[in-house]
Image (cartoon, grey):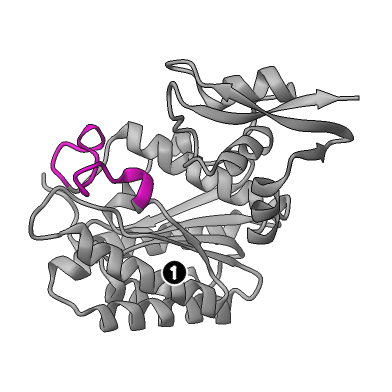
Amino acid sequence: MGHPTYEQWKILLEREAKAIAAVQGKDCLSVMLGDSLCLWFPVDLLPPGQLWLNQGIYGDNTAGILKRLSALADNRIHDVYLMVGINDIRQGRSDATIINNLRHIVGRIRMHHICAKVFILSILPTRLAALPNTRIRQINSKIEGLARQDGAIYLDLNTPFTDAADMLREDFTDDGVHVNFAAYQLWQQVMEQTTSRLALQRDDRYQNWLRESHRFSFNGKHYVWMPYQVRPGETLEEISLKTLGKSDVHHYDLIAIKNDINYQVLPHNETIYIPREIA
């Protein structure tokens, strides 16, 4: 038996959305909305403490998602994570068409789910010559502008997923487009880090201040920044545990912001700044 057709997927996901709406109650619902990259997001990597609904369909594009938003009409949605666009590029759509469809998607979500936060994820790089990252980055730049203009939140996955050859990291894929568990782990970290910064109000202004600061306070304690040479294999979580006493994202992200590090990727054998508690 083969995979469900696109229309069969639509019916299945609409039924699932209605089933969740019937039992959701006051629980906050987070929605993963997009193509197969969303569809295969591992359930055990979804951030805990919230109800999730995956509305990814293999091969979907911006026009398809726009047409099926009505399936979510009865749900009480807290967050929407939107990842779409690579199939539009494969199918020959222009940048203008992709951005226009995304703008309508964001507008429809905000119209029917007024309190929902909309996260637009960047289009990932590929290892296919027909889908060069130069074109993808060009569209991502426009997506970032759209998010800023329309009150959405842009998540840059393209940068940490790109290798020195300006392609999708080879260790993240088997077919050059779809990603593996290690890639989804990094994706999860990006989501976790972004939501942490929103919750703690670590906006661009705060991040710029922290990068320029010599000292800072956190949770009633005071710290100064000290130079430190990263050891091979050392992670932000380990350094955070040694210096701040905890290894969760709220703590290790301070070190990431200070050093302008992409998530938990550390420059081994290079010098970074780490906190030291002072009286």
Quarter of the picture holding the N terminus: top left
- Name the residue tied to disc 1: 144
Query: Is the magenta region chiefly helix, strand or loop?
Result: loop
**Residue in the image at 29% along x and 63% along y:** 137
Task: Specify start and end residues of the magenta stretch as a single range.
Answer: 159-176
Residue 27 is at least partly visible in this image? no
Q: Where is residue 94 in the image (x, y as percent from the top left)?
A: 20, 80
Task: Categorize mark 1 by other alpha carbons within 10 Å: few (<14), some (14-19), many (20+).
Answer: some
Displayed quadrant of residue 100: bottom left
**Residue in the image at 27% along x and 59% along y:** 9
Residue 7 versus residue 254: which sits nearer the camera?
254
**Residue in the image at 34% along x and 78% along y:** 99
- Amino acid type, label 1: Glu
In the figure, 236 relative to 94: above or below? above
Residue 137 versus residue 153: which sits nearer the camera?
137
In the figure, 72 relative to 93: above or below? above
